[in-house]
Image (tube, rainbow, N blue to C red):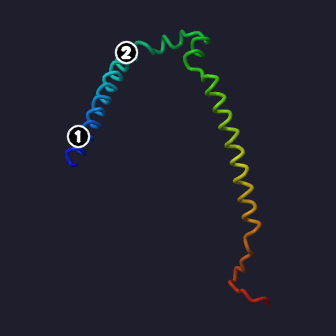
Amino acid sequence: MATDMMEAYYKVALKTLVDDVSNLAIERSLLQKLPSILSPEIVCDLTDEKVQRIAAESTESAAERALATERLSVLESGMAELKRLKMQSAPAVDPAGDDSAA
């Protein structure tokens, strides 16, 4: 049983190591070329259309963000209403701590 657990751990660890080394190699390759790809001169010379195509939010993402914003607004207004109702239903507390009626 211990050897099975050790073997399972080894498989996961080996896969993680291979994934990490692959990611590091790809990232290093990309980062080395980044200054020549995204130099300020090149970026400034891009047309508005190219900038839009490279950096614009997709229509799906924009729709998803709009829906999330709308849901957040509904939740925030609901929370405000619940807080308002909680304040109304809270019993009045005598600041002197005297529960007896005078």
Q: In the image, residue 67 lies at what x, y percent?
A: 68, 35
Q: Quadrant of residue 94?
A: bottom right
- Residue displayed at 37% across by 21% down: 31
- Kindly report the distance in space between the C-alpha atoms of the residues bearing marks 2 and 1: 40 Å
Of residue 64 and residue 6, the one placed in the foreground of this image is 6
Instruction: Inspect the image, locate mark 1, and give the three-letter code of the amino acid beneath it.
Output: Glu
Tell me which residue sits at (25%, 45%) in the image: 5
Q: Residue 28 location, x and y as percent?
A: 33, 22
Residue bearing the label numbered 2? 33
Foreground of the two, 81 or 102 = 81
Please name the residue shown 75% across and 60% down the image: 84
Q: Where 26 sits versus 74, above or below?
A: above
Q: Which labelled disc corresponds to residue 88?
A: none
Residue labelled with disc 1? 7
**Residue at the right extreme of this rendering:** 102
Question: Image check: 2 left or right of 100?
Answer: left
Above or below, 21 relative to 49: below
Tell me if 41 is positioned left or right of 30 in this view.
Answer: right
Give the structural element (helix, strand or loop) at label 2: helix
Q: Nearer the viewer, residue 54 or 13?
A: 13
Report crowding for label 1: few under 14, some 14 to 19, many 20 or more residues within 10 A (C-alpha): few
Which quadrant is the C terminus positioned in?
A: bottom right
| In this picture, residue 24 sits left or right of residue 65 | left
Identity, as a three-letter code, of the amino acid under mark 2: Lys
User: Up-down: is 57 above or below 71?
Assistant: above
Q: Which of 47/10 is in front?
A: 10
- Which residue lies at the image location 43% right of the left edge and 13% below the top edge? 37
Mark 1 element type: helix
In the picture, residue 101 is in which quadrant? bottom right
Image quadrant in which you'd find residue 45? top right
Residue 23 percent location from the top left of the image: 34, 26
The tag earlier along the polypeptide, 2 or 1, is 1
